[in-house]
Amino acid sequence: MDMLWPMLPLIGRILIGSYFVFFGVWNIYHCRPLLNILIQKNIPLPFIFLPLGIFWQITAGVMIVFGSSIKIAALSLALFTFIGAGIFHDFWNQKGEHHRLNKNIFITKLTIILGTLLILASSVTSL
């Protein structure tokens, strides 16, 4: 266990970064439904913001995995995830089963944000 302890920040970086890369690629394959949701919710310039968001999600995830500019990548992905959760999982506007499902996903996204901020904190303290 003592040998594992120093590796935990690296393992955390790989897991969190891979999460963002995976879902960035996932979002490429599900681009049309995501675009329709953005249009339905009157998000400005969805044809520009969606591809830029997906590009940044993948790029910043790779940056975290490889330890490059971790502070910028982690902070921007935390903000990105919070905004995305508010757009796509607005449980406060839902009722019944949709309310419960979106609330659970929103809370899961908050947990991902916490993990991302912990990566940020570990990169700041390791200077």
Image (cartoon, helix red, strand yellow):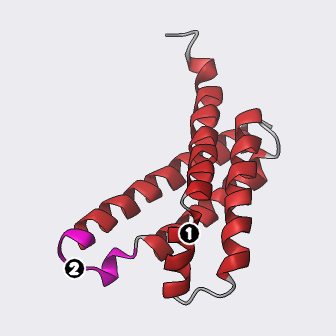
Q: Quadrant of residue 47?
A: bottom right
Measure how far apart labels 1 and 2 are at the Cα level. 25 Å
Instruction: Check disc 2: other Cα within 10 Å, few if <14, some if 14-19, many if 20+.
Output: few
Question: What amino acid is labelled 2 in the image?
Answer: Lys
| In-front residue for pair 100/123 | 100
Give the magenta part as a residue range.
90-98
| In-front residue for pair 83/40 | 40
Q: Residue at x 44, y 52 (%)?
A: 111
How far across and how far down the image is residue 64, in percent? 71, 41
Q: Residue at x 69, y 84 (%)?
A: 45
| Numbered circle sitting on residue 32 | 1
Q: Residue at x 71, y 66 (%)?
A: 51
Residue 117 in view: no
Q: Is residue 7 above or below residue 73?
A: above
In the image, residue 92 lies in the stretch drawn in magenta: yes
Q: Quadrant of residue 126?
A: top right
Q: What secondary structure prevails in the magenta region?
A: helix
Question: What amino acid is labelled 1 in the image?
Answer: Arg
Mark with earlier residue (1, 2): 1
| In-front residue for pair 9/44 | 44
Q: Is residue 104 left or right of residue 111?
A: left
Q: Mark 2 highlights which residue?
A: 95
Q: Is residue 45 left or right of residue 117?
A: right
How far across and how far down the image is residue 30, in percent? 54, 60
| Numbered circle sitting on residue 94 | none
